[in-house]
Amino acid sequence: MQKTVDNTAPNTLVPDPRRGRIFRDEVSGSTAAYGVGLVVGYRLPLGDGPWYVDGDIGAGWKNGAAEAQFDGVGVSPERRQLGESWPDSWSLTKDVNYEATLRFGGGPGRLRQHDLSLYLLAGVRLASLQFTNHYNGCFMPEACEHSEFRSGAENRDMELTAWKSGLGIEKQVNEGVAIRAEASYSAYGREEWTTPFEEVGVMVDSSMDTNEVGLTVGLLLRF
């Protein structure tokens, strides 16, 4: 995540030496999450050979939050005075995601003899996320003591779209049951927003790039 604190507005109340300056900060966060999901799909065999194309749509729910804290950028020891980039802490939680996936694969040769197939996948994913930023700092032009800092939280609901790609393996247990394991990578679009502090003439621009590496194990029931 990137954050830019802009003190260049003509009406800014930020005093020297921070007045007229721009402070930039960046930090990354990650987490390991788990979840469950349901999918419904259709498989189309390609002729009489071992190859096939299938597609599905589904929904998933995950537990886990990515968290991180900025170092803070400024000229004061704590980097929490007005106009500095404060050492905020933030978290990103995924509520639910919806996706549509296409797979192309097959089990030629010995793979078919063991009821195995390999496939490539591509798809699109729509995720609902909750972003929370916790801050603590000075909102006055005069330098604050630690006891004068004000704290709070900024909450944002995000709807992000990702392109997904990956590969997997499938084992046919019997005529109506199969087990699938796949690895995928999802790259979401960049989310950007601006938080204006008009009463003191400070603008805070934020941006976030999100990606996800997934490992999925599923039980398939065919009718």
Image: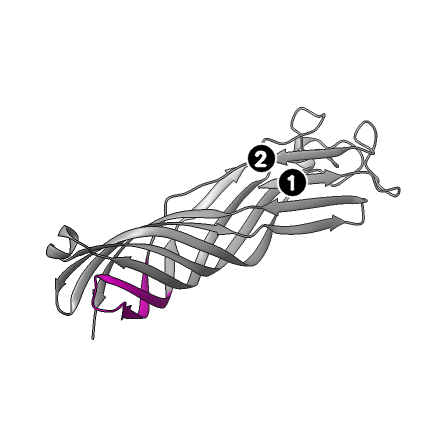
Answer few, some or many: residues within 10 Å of disc 1's Cα (few below 14, many 20 plus, some between 14 and 19). many
SS for callout 1: strand
Q: Secondary structure of the magenta portion, mostly?
A: strand
Q: Is residue 209 above or below residue 81?
A: below
Residue 94, image quadrant: bottom left
* Residue under the image location 76 percent in, 31 percent down: 143
For the N terminus, give its image quadrant. Answer: top right
CB of mark 2 within 8 Å of CB of mark 1?
Answer: yes
Residue 223, given in percent of the width and then of the height, sits at 20, 75
Residue identifier under label 2? 70
Instruction: Tell me which residue sits at (13%, 69%) in the image.
Output: 175
Q: Is residue 38 magenta?
A: yes
Residue 108, position as x, y percentages in the image = 19, 55
Q: Kindly state the secondary structure of the residue where label 2 is placed.
A: loop
Q: Which residues are magenta?
A: 36-58
In the picture, the disc for residue 3 is 1
Q: Give the side of residue 35 with respect to residue 22, left or right.
A: left
- The residue drawn where x is 11% and y is 56% is 113
Along the viewing direction, whichever of 88 and 36 lies nearer the viewer: 36
Q: Amino acid at mark 1?
A: Lys
How far, Cα to Cα, is label 2 from label 1?
9 Å
Residue 58 at x, y = what percent?
37, 66
**Sequence order check: which comes first, mark 2 or mark 1?**
1
Q: Residue furthest right?
A: 10
> Closest to the observer: 138 or 16?
16
> Residue 209 appears at what percent x and percent y?
55, 46
* Amino acid at dot 2: Phe
